Amino acid sequence: MSKLIIDGNAVYEIDENCMRKKREERNRKRSHEDERQKQEKRHLRDADKNEARRSR
């Protein structure tokens, strides 16, 4: 399905299926990046704990 947008003398056609797919892809990338950051923080936290144990 598509929508027509009229802006003064300009007319645009928006493909809603395409916009939905782009939005979903952006959300997947964000979720993946968030998960990667969480794993990195966990790894650093665990490395700090291990370092503290070794220095005792």
Image: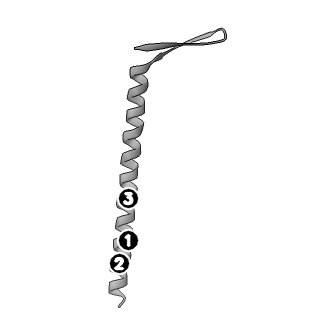
Closest to the observer, 50 or 17: 17
Pointers 1 and 2 in contact (C-beta within 8 Å): yes
Q: Quadrant of residue 11?
A: top right
Which residue sits furthest top? 9
Q: Residue furthest right?
A: 8
Quadrant for the N terminus, please. Answer: top left
Residue, disc 2: 49
Query: How crowded is the residue under tag 3: few (<14 C-alpha within 10 Å), some, or many (20+)?
Result: few
Which amino acid lies under the numbered mark 1 shown in the image of this protein? Arg
Give the residue at mark 3: 38
Which secondary structure lies at badge 2?
Answer: helix
Q: Is 34 above or below relative to 12?
A: below
Tell me, yes or no, whether the two marked residues, 3 and 1, touch with CB atoms within 8 Å: no
Kindly identify the amino acid type of the residue bearing the numbered disc 2. Answer: Lys
Q: Read off the residue under disc 1.
A: 45
At 33% from the left edge and 85% from the top edge, which residue is drawn? 53
Q: Earlier in the sequence, mark 3 or mark 1?
A: 3
> Could you say where residue 24 lies in the image, as x and y percent from the top left?
38, 34
Residue 52 in the image: above or below residue 33: below
